[in-house]
Amino acid sequence: MLFKKRRTGQSASPNRMMLRRTLFLMIVCGIVAFIALGARLFKLQIVDHEMYETAAVEQQLRQTTVTAKRGTIYDRNMNILAISASVSNIYISPAEIVMYGEDPAAIASGLAEILGLDYADVYEKTTHTNSWYVTIARKVEDDVADQVRQFKETGYLDEEGEQHSYNGVKIEEASKRYYPYSSLASHVIGFAGSDDHGLAGLEYYYDDVLSGTDGRIVRATTNLGTDMLFTDFEDYYDAVDGQSIVTTIDETVQRYLETRLAEAAEDYMLRDGAAGIVMDVETGAILGMASVGTFDLNNYMEIDPDTMAKIDEQSTGLTEEERDALIEESRSEMWRNKALTETYEPGSVFKIITLAAGLESGAITMDSTFYCGGSIEVLGRTDPLNCSNLGGHGDQTLTEAAMHSCNVAFVNIGLKIGAERFYDYIRAFGLFERTGVDLTGEAGSIWWDEDTFYDRSNLSQLAAASFGQTFTITPLQLITAVSAVANGGYLMKPYLVKEVLNADGTVASQTEPTVVRQVVSEDTSRKCCQILEQVVGNRNGTGVNAYVAGYRVCGKTGTSEDVTWEVAHGTKKYITSFLGFAPADDPKVAVLVLLKDPDPACGYGVAGGTMAAPTVGAILADVLPYLGVEPEYGEGEEAIVDQRVPKMVGKTVSEAKAAAEAAGFSVRSVVGDGDAVTAQLPAANAKVAAGSEVVLYCGAEPDSELVEVPNLRGVRYADARVVAGWDNLYVRGEGTMMESDNILIVSQSIDPGTMVEPGTIITVRMNDATKVGVF
Amino acid sequence: MAKKKENTVSYENARLADYTEDVTGERGPVDLPFALLSLLLLAVGVVMVLSASFARAYYDPTGSTGGNATYYFVRQALFALCGVGVMFACSRFPMGFYRQISGIVMMVSVALLALVLVPGIGEKVNNARRWINLKFTTFQPSEIAKIGVIMYFATLICRFKDKMRDPKYGIVPFAVILGGICALLYLEPHMSAIIIILVIGMVMLFLGGLPLYWFIGGGTAAAALLGIGYAVFPYVRNRFAAWLNPFADASDTGYQIVQSLYAIGSGGLLGKGLGGSMQKYLYLPEEHNDFIFSVYCEEMGYIGAILLLALFALLIIRGYWLSMHVRDRYSALVGAGITTHLAMQVILNVAVCTNSIPCTGISLPLFSYGGTALLLQMAELGIILSLSRDIPEKR
């Protein structure tokens, strides 16, 4: 019954309007809205999928870089020129400092103390609480990094006395470039920037080889930076360490070259630096290449104090920007590889090329003779071309013309060759194009265009080019071309890297010496060497100051004006140069030295023969024995070569006398009456001038009274030996060790008037000072 | 008039036993498609709670789960089991029972909405006092108020019948009730609940036969209010700005929505597979709650998302279909009201997740984590199942 009652209690059935409205709702809420949402999802998930996925992945993945070790740069004897060592970058994660509730002040003061930083600066960095990575210190050495690591591990004690390490302090592996020889070969090696990529020199040219490929670890992380659960999303890309390069640079040769250039820069007061190249004549390998001024690769931004003082002086009254510009300018100046990136007028050194071209083309022969009246009329020139010797060299053989560096003779040779043929040889010697050496920044040569040069109504270009003027080339082009003249006629492609090594030390690739072409015949080459040997080896040669006793040195002097400078500034600026190679019968090594803008106030005549030639001679005297070229002394040469003093102590007087005489010495006096020698002057194994008189002590105490060093400047070597001997002092020689009335001492290692012990050896430098004014 | 009196009398005299008798008595079976769709969605929802929540439960950045990865899942699963019981229990009670208790439900709702404002009873979370803590669980009175509005409005509409065209009956009592509830919700404050309750109330009046011009007027008024709100409250303006270009302030105001878009967008066509979401690793906030749909989209892809929306659409269409086929007007009103409520929650939630509307906190029925809300949703579905049993054709 109740059931029925309730039934009657039911409300009326829904009317049509209500059904219509329900249907309307059904369509709107059950169909239309869902279609709209489906469309919206289509846009998000299909159309814009990649955009959102990229953005999502970017925030979900954390990437850790595994730095590839940069390859090592070796010299040709595997001495390390540049090497990367592992260091650490210290950074903090302010976000984690906040997250783990660590004390930013404690972290800041700890790090500031260990790293020697300002507390306020470090603390400021901890306030970037949105960041996960704020660098505190870069490239920190291992021992300091260890201190930071210890600080991090030690951490702090929380309120319950529990120990926690600092999660917000992070240490990351990095690498730092070290250059063990600091400034040695700085322009060749170059340097790598803080991002470990090469910026200059070989570091730049071989950057791809050296840098290798950085590895990466990619991890999926939560918003807290921790690894995701159940998501083995971790990709590891191995780092591939860079390859190492073995250069052709010889650390010892490079050092000799740089030392001699530095000496020259000081002696001759060079105002525009110097450049030098030592090349293996047979292969084109560059054993040494240097520029003055140089810089320390480990602090490649640092300008030396003298230059800085000069900048400070100049910059008084200048704005900060102007001063920065000056600093920038002097930096690029000191980074410039002058032997590669600058061109110059080679001057008389170029006569080697003219000579070779003349002989090879048949324009001249060894029997050709030349008359020099002091000047020569050239078609197209209003005034005659002067020779260095305005009085004229008179009748000369070809060899004499070279010895005199006679412009008139060489103009004649050039004219005989003819403009077209001359340019053919220039082209063949590779002087129109860059050598292609494996170093960036090589400058290109500048020559007359063919129409001008070939002009038959104006031969002045050809005439000037014959003795090395009115065109510019790089020092590297010149030494490469002359090496071809020296080595039998083969133009080699110069190179600096002989091997590329894999990270495990195996050889990846080797550079074979490349013959570009044969330019002149072996016969011509031999004749040129014969002639050029006389330039140095003959006491009347202009290059006599490059003479090295025991070696047959070939060479040619050069003195040229810096034309661009003169045009720009109106003042004269000279480049004195010398190119020497040896030994004459089988040339091994060539040396080119450019001394730029010497100050005449230095006391030496401004000329290649007086400045550059002794420098090259000194370099060859160092390098040739080092390279294992045995000296061969000619007749009479032996007498002026310094000899090693034998050990006579312990011998009887007669034995000692015999030993001294065998070594080219004589005994001046025997002091004391003992049977055996108890002391000797000079000390055993010292090298002193042959013919020096030794003093033997037999039981008697050697004199200990100091003696005064005499002034030896301006005297001949043999006389110096005698003068010094009066005070029981000895001399040894450097420079032009040749018998000639013109070859005199120009400097001595110990200043006159200095008080020294008896037996002291004074090193004196010989030079033919008459080679001034000759080009 | 007499009929009305008879009705009243009959309900007043009825004892609970009358209905319990009816529970065991002869009624038709529940609508199988509706029941199965509900259970299927519930099952998927519970699985999604596990997938979406375990990262937050494991990492426990707020220190509430103790690092137990299944913390949220176990609780949700228990409530889901209870919910199934509640749903079938509700399907046993005849619709007359619901009509009779509708007034009580309404009063209880209002009382609870007032109580929650009392400090000490109502729990304040994020500057809003919306929760009542019952020690073993917490619940939002606004959830009960939604059912209360549906049930009691249906009762009133049935009582007023044709007088609904007269504003004195058709507007005033409803406006008073809605106004009161909205005022209480405003004090919490709880904007999304206000929106949902207003929409539900409107829909009930719409079904109840209120002339359409009221809705046109109401719509205009709502738009005007929105315009005023936009002009007056910077908070509203910020919401709109974040909606129009969430990437402009992706680390602050736009953060939730940007992370949600990353999740949905990175799902692509096929998704990353169940459990494969990466955005749930603490990038996406509320990932097991208001933004569970975003995690679902990331894991199941566009195809999965369309399938899920289709299931919801089918459930909603079926709900309306049942409401249209029941003979009893009260049942039809309650059925359509509950279905609309369900539809509003689903549509608005998905719309928020996809940044189709400005961001506001609306949970996804049967999916979002939350025990009492789930129980109430199951009860609502149970009521629809109950009315489905009265459809004569189904006999």
Image: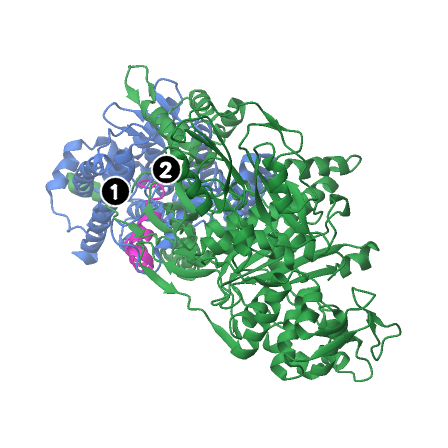
Q: Chain ID for label 1?
A: A
Vertical placement of A650 versus A534: above or below? above
* Residues at discs 2 and 1 in contact (Cβ within 8 Å): no
Q: The green chain is which one?
A: A
The answer to whether residue B243 of the structure is visible from this angle is no
State the mark number for residue B149.
2
| Secondary element type, mark 2 | helix
Asked if residue B287 lies in the magenta stretch, the reply is yes
Per the rendered image, the range of residues in magenta is B286-315
Chain for colour blue:
B
Q: Give residue A229's mark.
A: 1
A739 horizontally vs B302: left or right: right
Q: Mark 2 lies on which chain?
A: B
Give B199 or A542, whichever is nearer the viewer. A542
Q: Residue A656 got which mark?
A: none
In front: A383, or B130? A383
Q: How far across and how far down the image is residue A719, in percent?
A: 64, 44
Report the front residue among B196 and A670. Answer: A670
Q: Tell me if residue A181 is in the magenta stretch.
A: no
Q: Distance between the residues labelled 2 and 1?
A: 45 Å
Q: In this view, does A244 lie to the left or right of A380?
A: left
Q: In which quarter of the image is residue A44?
A: bottom left
Q: In this view, does A700 lie to the left or right of A724?
A: left
Question: Which residue shows up at 68% across the image and 57% down it?
Answer: A609
Q: Nearer the viewer, mark 2 or mark 1?
A: 1
The image quarter in which residue A338 lies: bottom right
Position of B241 with respect to A744 (left or right) is left
